[in-house]
Amino acid sequence: MEKQEDTGKRLIDKEQDDFDAIIVGSGYGGSVASFRLAMAGIKVCLVEKGRQWESHDFATDSLEIMSTVRMENRNLSFSFGPKDALFQVYEHNDSLAAVACGLGGGSLVNAGVMLPTPVRARRNPKWPKEWERDWDICEASAAAMLRVQSVPVRFPVAKVMGGIANGEIEDGSQDMKLSINFDLEEPPSNPMKPQQMGSCLACGNCLAGCPYNAKNSTDKNYILSAIQAYFL
Ligand SMILES: Cc1cc2nc3c(=O)[nH]c(=O)nc-3n(C[C@H](O)[C@H](O)[C@H](O)COP(=O)(O)OP(=O)(O)OC[C@H]3O[C@@H](n4cnc5c(N)ncnc54)[C@H](O)[C@@H]3O)c2cc1C
């Protein structure tokens, strides 16, 4: 507790300091960038418009979920729902976008499926050549950080999704893996201290946020590790 208070105070003190980099948004993009930069000794300020969500904050029934949505229609200039709602739906002209808002961004509410990058994507000439060489190392490092695990149960409702995913996996010997904790695999040899996780109870609430703290959203790994790296 004392250590936490000390860390909090130092965080506030550090806010007075200058930063070398400011990152906007804490989804996969922002949190991975924050962690990598912090590991390289760069002073990072990560800005997130949403709040921090704890497992007990997530809605678990359809009535409750309505209070976690904000709709904004730019054409008609109207909006409703709390500004820091977990789900933000934007309608503009003929486009509709639904995004997550909170520390961890989309990783709080997504399905956590991690597929190996298809060769056609790796070899896309738009990517720098060197990236293909390091791809496996980077993918393994992300899988370890997100604690990606094989699904131990064959959920009947996941049959269609499994079929689609298996069509995308080029190496047929591999299962579809999720960044969800099933408590079956060894924690990674991550140099940073991972957060204590819960275990998946197959409640099916994944897309509204995991009420059992079993989803490895980026607030529990990359962002936490970026903060730890900051104080090393
Ligand atoms: C329902 C659903 C299921 C999905 N399932 C999967 C899956 O299984 N596997 C997979 O790989 N991908 C999945 N995705 C996609 C994946 O979640 C996204 O591609 C990913 O989250 C995008 O990351 P990002 O960092 O670009 O943006 P986001 O994760 O959207 O993060 C952006 C963050 O920026 C914040 N922000 C926005 N504007 C500002 C501002 N002005 N100031 C400060 N903060 C701001 C937002 O609040 C948000 O937290 C899914 C997506 C959805 C919606």
Image: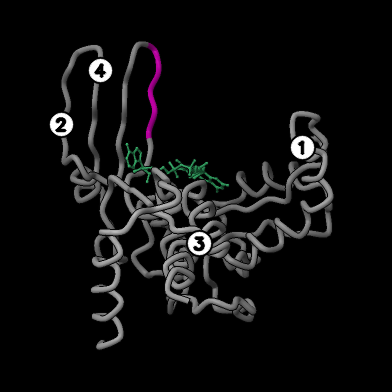
Q: Do tag 3 and tag 2 residues touch (Cβ < 8 Å)?
A: no
The residue beneath circle 1 is: 128
- Dot 1 falls on a residue whose secondary structure is loop
Q: Please say if 79 is above or below 173.
A: above
Q: Amino acid at mark 2?
A: Phe
**Inter-mark Cα distance, 2 to 4:** 12 Å
- Dot 2 falls on a residue whose secondary structure is strand
- Dot 3 falls on a residue whose secondary structure is helix
The part of the chain drawn in magenta is: 94-98
Q: Amino acid at mark 4?
A: Arg
Measuring from the top left, give residue 174's x and y in whole percent. Answer: 78, 59
- Dot 4 falls on a residue whose secondary structure is loop
- Disc 3 or disc 1, which is closer to the eye? 3
The residue beneath circle 3 is: 38
The residue beneath circle 4 is: 74
Give the mark nearest the N terminus, 3 or 2.
Answer: 3
**Inter-mark Cα distance, 3 to 4:** 37 Å
Farthest residue toward the front? 18
Binning the other alpha carbons within 10 Å of mark 2 as few (below 14), some (14 to 19) or many (20 upward) gives few
Q: Amino acid at mark 1?
A: Pro
